[in-house]
């Protein structure tokens, strides 16, 4: 395997696609060549599912003592840290975003976390309820897992693979076609750490074949569960396909996350910096971007002034330049999507900043778009209700707590929300009233604690939870064993 000709990984072997086809990935920064991947189709999925099925039904991994499985995960975590710079560089080249090393280290932490959770986990005994019987409540791996991952955070495969492998499951993985490189490297790391053949199988494909490959995984008779991260529209398609065989389905989907600033926020400067970072980070290509700013009327002008200052300080450029804080959008299609929403926004609201592609000569070969801010946005505006997935912020105002909760809940999404207030009663009433799976209070997207807590959404933002103990539970089946004692 070379850096410029990545292969599929099936049954512990690097293999070419059955059809012999490949595709190129070019960096969104300046369109230079990054790597070549296999453009797989359904035939490769059949091979990958067969390998995962055999590894689960008769291989050592599901039957391996917990301490031995944990040792493999810990070795993989150590290798990820050793190769962190290589992994980060790959992601930066493919998705065009700076600062990816932290994402690598976070996934190494996930491997270690689930290794520890695996060893400490206990099943239950029903002991004292009946004199002549005992009961065991046991958990077992769900089986073969099909994992379809997103391009904006390639190593988020770890959110799925780490707990699935800890549970004893085997996997068939299809990464986003725009950013497969880090997942290929992740497969190599697992192999080098001693993961048995067939436990982690990887199939890549270009955009045209991608839907076919995803559908083949979701519909495969040998797959017991499908876990998907991506858009709500595609998530519905995955769910429909998986429902024909009643597979377990986990979906982590889109968001239109509100960042809600009350008049008594501890610091408007800190809140403004976090709001701006949400729009600039990953160029807004995140379901948790905080793309709706809800601000109480009395502090609106002061907060918006600070937000604009922070966003204006963002530097667009080469993602390998340490001074760059905002890279390009992932491809031309995403750029066109953002431009179309901005044109809609210009008719619905008042443009405060951005709204065009940058004109600097050094940026013209990349898919750059200026961070954009709209004010006077109504709650029924499309830019306030639909996920743009780009560096676009919509500002709405509210009167009081009840109005803030109503506005925050006024979209079909329910992934994340932020609340800024000194008043614990206000903050907790907001947290109880908002219909989202995640609520940050006075620190938007602070993942230092969240990485060990469950993450997921309500409504159009998906079903099921990743991270934390719940992340491991997602890949487990529960079995009740009832034992009649010999007396009588």
Image: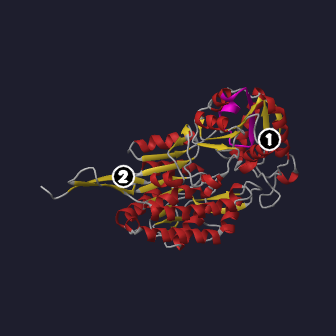
Is residue 399 positioned above or below 31 on the image?
Answer: above
In which quadrant of the rendered image does the C terminus lie? Answer: bottom left
Residue 80 coordinates in the image, percent (x, y): 61, 68
Q: Is residue 238 left or right of residue 309?
A: left
* Numbered label attached to residue 268: 1
Residue 378 falls in which quadrant of the image?
top right
Question: Quadrant location of the N terminus?
Answer: bottom right
Q: Which residue is mark 2?
A: 478
Q: Secondary structure at mark 1?
A: helix
Q: Which residues are magenta?
A: 382-401
* Residue 252 position (above or below residue 197): above
User: In this view of the protein, which residue sits in the foreground, 42 or 227?
Assistant: 227
Q: Position of residue 111 (x, y in %)?
A: 55, 63
Front position among marks 1 and 2: 1
* Viewer-closest of 17 and 454: 454
Name which quarter of the figure residue 370 lies in: top right
Is residue 284 a member of the stretch shown in magenta? no
- Work out whether residue 8 or residue 106 is closer to the camera in this orientation and state it: 106
Q: Is residue 80 left or right of residue 310?
A: left
Examine the structure image and report whether residue 400 is included in the region drawn in magenta. yes
Q: Closest to the observer: 70 or 339?
A: 70
From the top left corner, tell me how far across and down residue 219 is, in percent: 43, 48
């Amino acid at each position: 395997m070379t850096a410029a000709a990545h292969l599929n990984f099936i049954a512990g072997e690097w293999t070419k696609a059955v059809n012999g086809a490949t595709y190129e990935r070019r960096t969104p920064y300046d369109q230079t060549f990054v790597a070549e991947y296999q453009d797989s189709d359904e035939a490769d999925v059949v091979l990958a599912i067969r390998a995962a099925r055999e590894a689960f039904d008769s291989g050592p991994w599901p039957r391996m003592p917990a301490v031995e499985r944990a040792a493999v995960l810990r070795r993989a975590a150590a290798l990820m840290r050793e190769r962190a710079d290589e992994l980060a560089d790959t992601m930066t080249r493919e998705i065009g975003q700076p600062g990816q090393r932290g994402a690598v280290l976070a996934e190494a932490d996930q491997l270690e976390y689930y290794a520890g959770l695996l060893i400490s986990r206990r099943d239950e005994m029903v002991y004292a309820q009946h004199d002549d019987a005992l009961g065991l409540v046991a958990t077992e791996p769900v089986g073969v897992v099909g994992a379809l991952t997103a391009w904006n955070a390639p190593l988020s495969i770890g959110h799925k693979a780490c707990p699935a492998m800890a549970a004893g499951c085997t996997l068939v993985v299809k990464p986003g076609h725009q950013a497969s490189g880090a997942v290929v490297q992740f497969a190599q790391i697992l192999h080098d750490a001693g993961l048995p053949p067939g436990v982690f199988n990887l199939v890549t494909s270009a955009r045209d074949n991608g839907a076919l490959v995803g559908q083949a995984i979701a519909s495969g008779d040998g797959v017991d569960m499908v876990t998907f991260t991506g858009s709500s529209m595609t998530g519905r398609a995955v769910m429909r396909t998986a429902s024909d065989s009643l597979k377990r389905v986990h979906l982590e989907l889109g968001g239109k996350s509100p960042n809600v600033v009350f008049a008594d926020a501890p610091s408007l400067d800190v809140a403004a910096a976090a709001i701006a970072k949400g729009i600039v980070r990953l160029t807004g290509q995140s379901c948790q971007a905080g793309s709706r700013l809800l601000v109480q009327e009395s502090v609106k002008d002061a907060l918006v002034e600070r937000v604009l200052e922070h966003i204006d300080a963002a530097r667009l450029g080469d993602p390998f330049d340490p001074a760059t804080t905002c890279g390009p959008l992932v491809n031309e299609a995403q750029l066109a999507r953002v431009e179309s929403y901005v044109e809609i926004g210009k008719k619905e609201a008042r443009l405060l900043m951005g709204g065009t592609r940058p004109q600097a000569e050094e940026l013209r070969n990349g898919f750059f778009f200026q961070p954009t801010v709209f004010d006077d946005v109504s709650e029924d505006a499309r830019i306030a209700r639909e996920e743009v997935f780009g560096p676009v912020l919509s500002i709405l105002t509210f009167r009081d707590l009840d109005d803030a909760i109503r506005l925050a809940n006024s979209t079909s999404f329910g992934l994340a929300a932020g609340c800024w207030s000194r008043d614990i009663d206000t903050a907790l009433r907001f947290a109880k009233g908002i219909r989202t799976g995640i609520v940050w209070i006075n620190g938007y997207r602070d993942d230092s604690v969240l990485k060990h807590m469950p993450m997921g959404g309500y409504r159009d933002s998906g079903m099921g939870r990743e991270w934390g103990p719940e992340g491991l539970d997602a890949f487990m089946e529960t079995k009740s064993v009832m034992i009649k004692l010999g007396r009588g």
